[in-house]
Amino acid sequence: MNQSPTNLTSRREFIKSSGKIAAASALAGVAIPRVHAAGNNTIQVALIGCGGRGGGAADNALSVKNGPTKLVAMADVFDHRLKSSYDALKRQHPELVNVPENRKFIGFDAYKKAMDCLKPGDVAIFTTPLAFRWVHFTYAIQKGLNVFMEKPLTADGPTSRRMLTLAEEATAKNLKVGVGLMSRHSRALQELHQRIQDGEIGDLILLRGYRMHGPVGSAFSEKWPGKPSELLWQIQHFHSFLWASGGCYSDFYIHHIDHLCWMKNAWPVKAQALG
């Protein structure tokens, strides 16, 4: 389909602006400026959201070869998740996990307390359900913190626009933001992208992406049993609730949408759906 130069320009500009928040980078690939006092180059890390993905992201952060990094604070709304994540990370990285009881925070304000343990230039990891992402990102920018946030980021248009505005604020402060679209770090996909851009297969007329997998753990929840609170129940089973996960397109298909847009160097101008 022919596109006018104006259309192409606007789409490229959108890629540039949205890429500040949604372009994939991983914590291991983010060059963090050293802004700490002389003699202490350790990058301190706070983990916000201590589920399986949070534990994995923290493990990645502590495994960075060009650190040094140290986990100093953790936050979650569930104490059992924080405890299990802490125990696992402490076993994996005994010298790099320094989170005493007074730096383990539980509750909806725990994210602030954890980030308050950091200095400007340190790193906050956001691995909660997406409903809280913009709130946490706002506070991280205020604190001057670099961020790794797991995808997905938003569940609706207004919040997406809010995140793009926050990304501009982070860029203005020279803060580094990595997002968990890990495919951008695949050397094979990087080479494929370059070969497509070099015209080896000609013009891209049609691209399709497919994903096949079994049921997600919390996607098919039972009826709320009356405890804990309904809010905590929905957070615990966030895949079942659009406000908390964004659904399959936001949570899982985001990778395939990212692949296709990357290879085309453009975002879609419209979408159609059946359902």
Image (cartoon, rainbow, N blue to C red):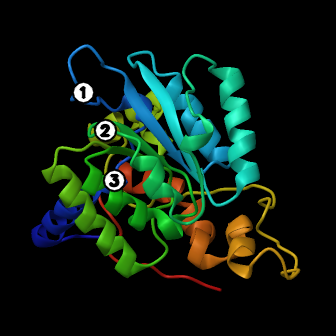
Q: Nearer the viewer, mark 2 or mark 3?
A: 2
Query: Which amino acid type corresponds to the residue marked 2 in the rendered image?
Result: Lys
Reading the image, the residue beneath label 2 is 119
Q: Residues within 10 Å of mark 3 (few under 14, many from 20)?
A: many
Q: Which quarter of the image is occupied by the C terminus?
A: bottom right
**Circle number at residue 36:** 1
Q: Which residue is farthest bottom?
A: 275
Q: CA distance from mark 1 to mark 2?
A: 8 Å
**Spot occupied by residue 118 in the image (x, y as percentages of width and height):** 37, 40
Most foreground residue, 236 or 38: 38
- Count of numbered labels shown in the rendering: 3
Is disc 1 placed on a helix, strand or loop? loop
**Spot occupied by residue 95 in the image (x, y as percentages of width and height):** 57, 16
Q: CA distance from mark 2 to mark 3?
A: 11 Å
Where, by quadrant of the figure, is residue 244 drawn? bottom right
**Spot occupied by residue 248 in the image (x, y as percentages of width and height):** 63, 67
Query: Which amino acid type corresponds to the residue marked 3 in the rendered image?
Result: Ala
Reading the image, the residue beneath label 3 is 140
Query: Which amino acid type corresponds to the residue marked 1 in the rendered image?
Result: His
Q: Are marks 1 and 2 in contact (CB under 8 Å)?
A: yes
Left/right placement of residue 22 relative to residue 172 reads right
Q: Residue at x 13, y 64 (%)?
A: 9
First in sequence: mark 2 or mark 3?
2
**Spot occupied by residue 205 in the image (x, y as percentages of width and height):** 38, 60
